[in-house]
Image (spheres, rainbow, N blue to C red):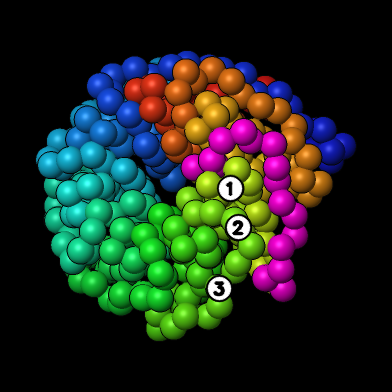
Amino acid sequence: MWSMLGVHPKWTSLSTLGGHSHWVHAVAFSPDGKVLASASSDKTVKLWDPVSGRCLATLEGHGDTVLAVAFGLNGTLLASTGWDENIRLWDMASGRCLAILEGHAGWVQALAFDHAGTILASASADKTVKLWDSASGRCRATLEGHGDDVNSVDFSPDGKLVASASQDRSVRLWDSSSGRFIRALEGHANWVNDVAFSPAGRLLASASQDRTVALWDTGSWKLARRLEGHTGPVDAVAFSSAGRLVASASADKTIRLWDTASGRCLQTLVDHSMGVRGIAFSPDGKLLASASADKSVRLWRTAS
């Protein structure tokens, strides 16, 4: 009822997941929402039960900071990557590392699976995006054209497009099957740190070092609105499962929740003691996870 009336429920802090010994850079929920993965500078990935807050497993093997995690293949596969330039694929049933994907010439900063979970995209400081076959580990394509580090990558819901965000201040769009460059979206005044498609694919959000989030209309590829209010760089952005909310995480230690229709800031979440590096909504939209330089993962909940 709240969504029909245009009223959004308030979010409150649920729990703090402690266990990492260094910055936490990213979080991701499994497709069924039963597992939360976190990536840290302590060289590990931790798996959590988001209901109890219990640590289910610690995945070790990376030789340096882990910057990104992503679930694929209906949650049976987890990918992780970071400063050691390798991508590790993990079997979620056993916690065993199945494969190590190599090929980037710089650290890998972000990962995303298409919605079928069969193609993995990786964004690197070597200025490229690579597309991998998740079953064979074969590199299908290398997307080149950015003039600086690529910070983030995401697939459109239909899997036809790949969006990449770069320190060259642009977002680039690519055809996922051919790797062909389609267009560049420009308008940020500084690095673009993160990019995310809305669940329905009608909007693309980009988060920037310029302290703003841009929402792009994917029909016209014009700027629909700019979300302003953070007092520090915006490092991450995520849409709720219904697409009515977009969350932004900032070095200013806060998370802001915005109404996608109006662009209005609905709530500011303040609990982290250092910058917020990553955020993710649960598949049912009732939980929000945040990763911070304060070494913690926090869970937030809504009453709806």
Disc 3 to disc 2, how far (Cα)?
12 Å
Q: Which residue is drawn at the image coordinates 48% and 50% (left, top)? A: 193
What residue range appears in magenta?
Answer: 220-235
Residue at the spot 55% in from the left edge and 29% down from the top edge = 252
- Quote the CA–CA distance across marks 2 and 1: 7 Å
Q: Where 125 sits versus 93, above or below?
A: below
Residue 184 shows which numbered tag?
3
Question: Within the magenta stretch, is there residue 273?
Answer: no
Q: In this view, does 288 lie above or below 205?
A: above
Residue sitting at the far front: 189
Tell me the mark number nearer the camera, choosing from 3 and 2: 2
Residue 185 seen by the camera:
yes
Observer-nearest of 105 and 140 = 105
Q: In this view, does 22 lie to the left or right of 116?
A: left
Residue position for label 1: 210
Provide residue 257's location: percent of width, then percent of height: 66, 35
Residue 83 position in % (x across, y down): 22, 47
Q: In this view, does 26 lie to the left or right of 13?
A: left
